Amino acid sequence: MSDHEVARVLRVEGRVLAGPDDVRDGLWAVGGRITYERPPGADDAVTLTGWSLPGLVDAHCHVGLDRHGPVDAATSEKQALTDRAAGTLLIRDAGSPSDTRWIDDREDLPKIIRAGRHIARTRRYIRNYAHEIEPGDLVAYVAREAERGDGWVKLVGDWIDRDAGDLTACWPRGEVEAAIAEAHRLGARVTAHCFAEAALRDLVEAGIDCIEHATGLTEDTIPLFAERGVAIVPTLVNIATFPDLAAGGEAKFPRWSAHMRQLYERRYDTVRAAYDAGIPVFVGTDAGGSLAHGLVAAEVAELVKAGIPPLEALSATAWGARRWLGRPVLEEGAPADLVVYDEDPRADVRVLAAPRWVVLDGRVVG
């Protein structure tokens, strides 16, 4: 079946993993929607066979961005297609300076939930990525990005402070509280980039909904996250770059370099402690900055390596992640967004690296 080919009726045979404990014998896609009832025209259906999961979620991905800043539409399209080939059919774009709304009109590209553009402190983030502002403007910029996004806003919670020579919090507590309250008033959730320890308590107590990376979690803040239900997206495939970053900054910022190595060395223990405490953990790759797209399977494998049970690691990119983002799974009437594998991914999450078929809105696209 060629790329973009649409079957009037599509039959998916084999085992459908509709939920962690909900395994069904096949489904149909009619008009791009799922049904478990045999439809008219079933005799002429195109049939795919294998183990099916909901379209995977990359909850920290940047379409329209590379290491230098915004990219053109052709590059953005290539990024989205790479994610699609990996089985990622739902992306939470955790900050991008590019306008990617045109992707919403493409039936062959992943669906995107946008967080607008990053909001960072002046000269405290990667050049060309963020709105760089001072605390007095934080509420206004959060309101602006809440209106532009799809229910999320992205703050840069900490970054290297050149005077301190290490990671420090970017925002005063009062401004953070006011900004998060404004986002919530406008119906948006707020997440923040945080590598270190210092910013976490203020952000969580101010009402934040999620923390990206969260390498600075400690035994003091893990209970607070669990109590407030604040999710984390660890991006372990990105944390793997910390040693190289530390080596590059050693001469100028030795304290920062040592701190980055410490965060890296305890990364698996941090994620497992968070999971054990009941903190919601979701899959995100941080693709689109310095990392390539299409790494969702590698991130799931990293969560398993950290000690998260395989079924829970699958949920972090499938059923659980979709529900967290307010999107359907493989239920009656839902969009037929699914990935078909030759083997059971519950038995070995490495199966995710080799999709047999990718189906988007009932359309076989890969």
Image (cartoon, grey):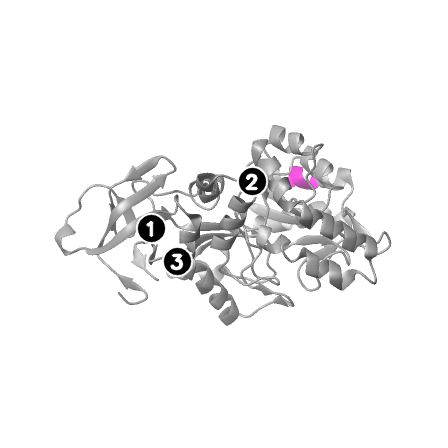
- The circle drawn on residue 246 is none
Tell me which numbered mark, 3 or 1, is placed earlier along the sequence: 1
Can you say whether 161 is above or below 25 in the image? below
Q: What stretch is highlighted in magenta?
A: 178-182
Under mark 2, the amino acid is Gly
| Image depth: mark 2 or mark 1 in front | 1
Instruction: Name the amino acid, label 1.
Output: Glu
Q: Residue 343 carries which label?
A: 1
Q: Distance between the residues labelled 2 and 3?
A: 38 Å
Give the mark nearer the N terminus: 2 vs 3.
2
Residue drawn 43% across and 56% down? 353
**What secondary structure is found at the residue carrying circle 2?**
loop
Q: Mark 2 points at which residue?
A: 187
Residue drawn at point x = 70 percent, y = 43 percent = 216
Residue that mark 3 sits on = 354
Q: Percent x, y for residue 9?
A: 21, 54
Q: How many angstroms separate mark 2 from mark 1 (CA)?
A: 40 Å
The image shows residue 160 at horizontal and vertical percentages of: 77, 54
